[in-house]
Image (cartoon, coloured by chain):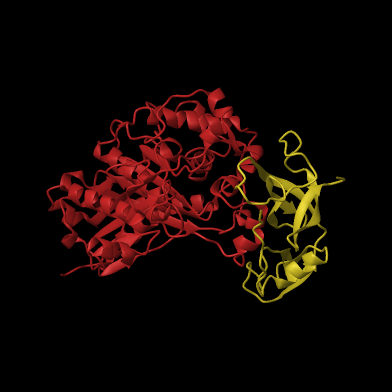
Chain colours: A red, B yellow
């Protein structure tokens, strides 16, 4: 095949297949790898392609070669970049770079995780000799809810906010999940119910923490040129810009506790590579394992000024009918969260841009997707559009 | 019941040996005049090996925290208050706050703290207590 290197951005690369596992929730009859496979087969059907069309495979969790072999694919390009639950945002941009460079033609990106049932999962153990093992685990900063959450009070304190503002995030996202039959939590609840829910790790009540589920998702990327020749070409979604950044693997070593600089750096690169500004964004997904992340995200991505995130949500700008619809599947807090939620944020962006979302936002042309990973260790940003520039 | 016990590596051994003696000693970058954490044999600010160990004052402020209400069954904890403390010398450390009720009304951000050393299963670790406690 002939190939001329092109830009990975600017709409040259497209998503032509996107699907989640047939079911999400509690799936004790499926192993982790079968969740990858179920999502992959659904995405292939969505794209009208077969296994034989895939020459690149990327995943995070299991090795890409495990997923490739499981599916019967012998790829000429693989990527297993693992930076936590937001890895899939990086894999999209790595796949775009590979396609643009001619290293792969059609890339499959998979996620599957038996986060609730723990079937066929690889062990996740951290050595007592690791720096996390020496300097964080002895203090009980061991689980997501006692580690990822620790910076939140600093964020709130520096802005004169309170735990009540975490509840605001939960309430806004329930406005979306209430419209989504696949969401795990669909009940509209009150502020008192959020604040008085069982305490998990103060200031986080149970409602401010993500759900824990089984599920998966898969994406298929190829060049916009090739997409145009496919029967599903009119449903293609284009990558306009992207960015990735990493910070500290220890939460205590964040550059700034009350602001996530990896969010700032990855989003700035995404905007600059897309040649877009915040006002150009119609739809926003911010990875929300816990309720403080959309607050960090809105501010660090620059959609609002410092200290304005909670008021922006409270004023209704991110709920149905608002000017910046955010986490429109209900998010990790209400829709689903397998452990590495990033894939689901991307899937919702694709659905919105195709006009196929459960809670469809009218006239979406652009979507910004922000990932986070290994607590506050990595960030990656994607800007998609349903129109090729 | 069991703790997650830390295990020293060559670059952190001096830190843990000092902790055992009741001293909080951190690496210091001689080029930039800054302490850094966690320990390594070079400066993460400059990449220079021009570093030395310096004992800190043990003074800190409460930078952020959570109060864990969901301890893992069978896991021992020093305190349910899992905190970031900001040392007077600059670095931020994960630690526990002891000698205080796990009560948000008493745990005020920026309150002054002092280092304290506790033994867990024979291993000494630094924790922090309110000044004067």
Indicate the quadrant where residue A332 lies. top left
Report the residue at 62% width, 49% height from top. A257
> Where B120 sits versus A276, above or below?
below
> Where A228 sits versus B27, above or below?
above
Decide if residue B28 is on the left or right side of residue A54. Answer: right
Q: For residue B30, say whether it is visible.
A: no
Decide if residue A374 is on the left or right side of residue B111. Answer: left
**Position in image of residue A193 (x %, y %):** 54, 25
Indicate the quadrant where residue A212 lies. top left
Report the residue at 39% width, 50% height from top. A114
Q: For residue B40, say whether it is visible.
A: yes
Indicate the quadrant where residue A334 lies. top left
Q: Nearer the viewer, residue A203 or B98?
A: B98
Q: Nearer the viewer, residue B66 or A225?
A: B66
Report the residue at 56% width, 48% height from top. A148
**Position in image of residue A296 (x %, y %):** 53, 42
Report the residue at 74% width, 68% height from top. B15
Q: Nearer the viewer, residue A348 or A12?
A: A348
**Position in image of residue A88 (x %, y %):** 38, 54
Decide if residue B7 is on the left or right side of residue B107. Answer: left
């Amino acid at each position: 095949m002939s190939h001329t290197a092109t830009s990975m951005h600017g709409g040259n690369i497209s998503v032509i297949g996107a699907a989640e596992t047939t079911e999400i929730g509690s799936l004790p009859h499926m192993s982790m790898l079968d969740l990858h496979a179920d999502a992959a087969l659904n995405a292939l059907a969505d794209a009208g392609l077969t296994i034989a069309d895939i020459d690149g495979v990327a995943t995070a969790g299991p090795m890409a070669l495990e997923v490739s072999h499981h599916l019967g694919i012998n790829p000429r390009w693989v990527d297993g970049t693992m930076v936590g639950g937001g890895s899939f945002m990086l894999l999209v941009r790595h796949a775009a770079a590979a396609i643009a460079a001619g290293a792969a033609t059609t890339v499959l990106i998979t996620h599957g995780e038996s986060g609730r049932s723990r079937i066929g999962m690889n062990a996740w153990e951290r050595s007592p000799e690791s720096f996390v093992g020496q300097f964080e685990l002895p203090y009980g900063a061991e689980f997501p809810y006692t580690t990822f959450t620790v910076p939140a009070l600093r964020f709130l304190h520096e802005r004169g906010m309170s735990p009540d503002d975490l509840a605001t995030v939960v309430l806004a996202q329930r406005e979306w999940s209430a419209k989504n039959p696949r969401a795990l939590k669909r009940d509209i609840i009150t502020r008192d119910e959020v604040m008085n829910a069982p305490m998990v790790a103060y200031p986080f009540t149970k409602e401010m923490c993500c759900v824990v589920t089984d599920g998966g998702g898969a994406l298929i990327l190829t060049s916009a040129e090739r997409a145009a020749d496919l029967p599903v070409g009119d449903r293609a979604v284009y990558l306009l810009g992207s960015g990735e950044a990493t910070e500290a693997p220890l939460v205590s070593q964040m550059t700034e506790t009350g602001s996530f600089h990896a969010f700032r750096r990855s989003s700035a690169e995404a905007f600059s590579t897309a040649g877009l500004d915040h006002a150009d964004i119609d739809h926003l997904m911010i990875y929300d394992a816990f309720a403080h992340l959309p607050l960090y995200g809105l501010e660090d991505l620059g959609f609002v000024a410092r200290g304005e995130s909670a008021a922006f949500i409270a004023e209704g700008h991110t709920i149905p009918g608002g000017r910046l619809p955010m986490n429109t599947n209900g998010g990790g807090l209400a829709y689903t969260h397998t452990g590495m939620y990033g894939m689901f944020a991307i899937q919702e962006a694709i659905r919105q841009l195709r006009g196929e979302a459960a809670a469809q936002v009218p006239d979406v042309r652009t979507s910004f997707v922000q990932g986070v990973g290994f607590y506050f260790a990595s960030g990656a940003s994607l800007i998609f559009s349903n129109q090729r520039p | 019941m069991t703790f997650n016990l830390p295990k020293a590596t060559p670059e952190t051994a001096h830190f843990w040996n000092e902790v055992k003696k009741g001293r909080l000693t951190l690496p210091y970058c001689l080029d930039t005049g800054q302490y850094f954490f966690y320990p390594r044999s070079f400066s993460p600010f400059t990449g220079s090996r021009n570093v030395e160990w310096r004992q800190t004052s043990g003074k800190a402020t409460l930078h952020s925290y959570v109060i864990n209400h969901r301890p893992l069954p069978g896991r021992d904890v020093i305190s349910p208050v899992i905190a970031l403390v900001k040392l007077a010398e600059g670095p931020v450390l994960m630690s526990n706050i002891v000698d205080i009720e796990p009560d948000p009304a008493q745990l005020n951000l920026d309150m002054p703290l002092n280092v304290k050393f506790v033994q867990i299963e024979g291993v000494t670790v630094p924790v922090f207590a309110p000044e004067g406690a």
